[in-house]
Every structure is written in C-alpha cells, then in structure tokens.
Amino acid sequence: MTRHARNCTAGAVYTYNEKKRDAAESGYGTNAQRLGKDSVKSFDCCSLTLQPCRRPVVTKDGFLFDKEAILQYIVTKKNEYSRRLKEYERLRRAEEEQLSQEASSKQQARMERFVNAEKPAMTPAHSSAVGERPSTSAAATSSSSSATPSTSSTSSSSISNMTNGHEKKLPSFWLPSECPNAGAAKAQKPDATIYCPVSQQPLRVKDLIDVKFTLLKDGDFKRSLIAKEARYMCPITHDVLSNAVPCAVLRPTGDVVTMECVERLIRKDMIHPLTDRKLKDKDIIPLQRGGTGYATTNDNLQAKEKRPMLQV
C-alpha cells in the first residue's frame, strides 16, 4: 500500500482516518465517544440530583438516593396521581351522561316508530269521513313523487363526499378533528403505583433503607468532605471506597462494606461483623455504582444516536 500525503486525493485507497474524518464532517455514520470521568456518577451520589448525598437512602435494588430528593419525587408522583384520578372521574361521568343520553334517544326513537306504525290504521276511517280529499292528496303525492325521481336517484347514486349534508364541512381529512378516531378521550384509570425513577420497579417509602458511610481517617481536616476524592472507607477492612470497588449495604445497620469483605468474611457465617447479628441473603444489598474506565462496569451504560449511513 502506497503512502499518502496529507492532502492527497488521488489515491485508490479510502483509509480509516479519512472515513472517520468525512463521517464527522458530514454527519453520517456511527458516532462513538469515550466518556470521561466527569460524565460518570460517583458511587455516593444521589441518582436524581447527581450530588453527594446528605442523608443517603438505598432501595432494595441497590440504587442510592438523597432522602430529601426521593421523598420529593414520591410526593410529586402522588400529586400527579391525584390530578389524573380527578380527570378520570370527570371523563367517566361524561361517558355515563353520554350513555344515558343515547339510551334516552333510542327510547324516544322506539316510541316514535311505534306511534308512526299506529297512524296508517286510522287513515281509512278518516278518508271515508272527508269524502274525496284522500284521493286528491294521494294524487298530489303521486304527482310529486313522479316529478322528482331524477333528484332522488341523483342524490342516492352520487359518490361525492360533499353530499348528504357534508357540503358545509371542510374536506380537510388531515386535521385531527376530521380523523375517523376523533372524539372524546377515553377514561382510563391511572396507576397508583409509584415506580423507581432508575429501575422502574415499585417504590415505597417503607422500603427505603438508611445508609451509613464510614468516613476515611486520613487526618486532612483542612479540605471539605466534598473536595476530597477519597471520602469513605469500609468499616471492617478499612479499604477506600470508590467506583472501582464493588460495595454492598448491610440492611440491619446500613453500613457500606466492600463486596470482597462480604465474600470473604460475611458469607461464611452470615453474621454481621459489627453487631454479631444473624444475616440473611436479602440483608446484603449490592450497591449500584457509577461507571469507570473499564468496560465491565459499563454494561448498562448505553447511548445511541441514529444518523444516516455513509455509503462508499
């Protein structure tokens, strides 16, 4: 393969670098970018505010939230449910009124048909009483019917969409009000369940577990806690906690320990090392952490941008 100059365009080979450059300039093809450290949530940050938690709580699925933020989220969802419930009741009452009106109109139509069916039985007596008038009216009726056969046949045989009273309506079938399914909204009862904003699993206030982080004893009291990169440690092994260290929350006390401590020490006897309390499998909650520079921790992190393909 021959070597190209920087601005050489006469080569027969379309190199990978040229393809990536053209794709970036033209807006075609797959767009991939490595996430930096600032784009990844820290393990001790709230999943809603993305800030370090002041009063951390964790769900049974291991997602960390600030207690104030998650309670405000739950209150907002409850208010939204109340609003949707009122709207559902309003639509349901409107549907009931419409059904009652349709039932009354059908009943009225049946009564009118019954009354009209009884009228021809009274016509002979009436015609015998008035003498020659029925024949005259019948002749007039027959003459009028014979005079307008073309009009009725024309209206019945027409295929135009402007007949049968539609001439005053705009033939704008692309408008939402002219669609076949246009009409009043259907009443659908809202779901009262509140779901976790991250895992989309049912969320209840009583399922939130208070988390207790153990401060790292580094002797540096000049900097604030937020300014430090290493803030917490495992209370048992004193290992520094970070996104690169898998962690777990012990449900009875809320202590955050490393998964290495769980596998090597806790799971052998299933006893809490700090309180000597018997533990169960559900008492060990793996803490969901942010990503790192390694692909194994970013298996759930995906971002897609659909763009046209660049055909060569």
Image (spheres, rainbow, N blue to C red):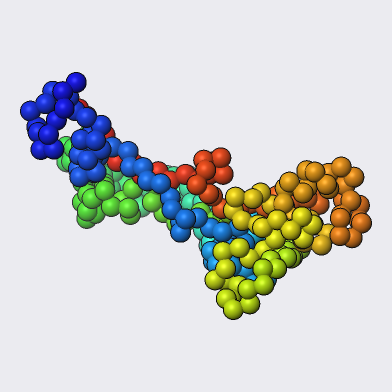
Residue 17, quarter of picture = top left
Name the foreground residue: 299 vs 13: 13
Return the x and y of residue 214 as percentages of the image width and height. Answer: 73, 65
Which residue corresponds to the image point at 9% horizontal and 32% vertical from the top-left?
Answer: 9
Determine whether 185 is above or below 17 in the image.
below
Name the image quarter holding residue 5. top left
Question: Residue furthest toward the left?
Answer: 10
Residue displayed at 26% across by 34% down: 309
Please state, as top left, top right, bottom left or bottom right, where the N terminus lies in the image. top left
Q: Residue at x 83, y 59 (%)?
A: 252
Q: Residue at position x 89%, y 51% from top?
A: 271
**Residue 28 appears in which quarter of the rendering?**
top left
Q: Position of residue 151 (x, y in %)?
A: 18, 41
Q: Is residue 30 left or right of residue 39?
A: left
Quadrant containing the C terminus is top left
State the image coordinates of residue 255 (x, y, percent, origin top left): 77, 60
Q: Nearer the viewer, residue 207 or 236?
A: 236
Residue 180 can be seen, yes or no: no
Is 296 placed above or below 194 here? above
- Specify the farthest residue to the top: 1
Total number of numbered discs in the rendering: 0
- Give the x, y percent position of residue 118: 49, 47
Judge from the rendering whether residue 28 lies leftward or rightward of residue 223; answer left or right.
Answer: left
Res 154 seen here: yes
173 to the left or right of 129: left
Q: Which residue ends up furthest to the bottom in the rendered image?
A: 222
- In the image, taking residue 258 as reference, residue 276 lies left or right, namely right
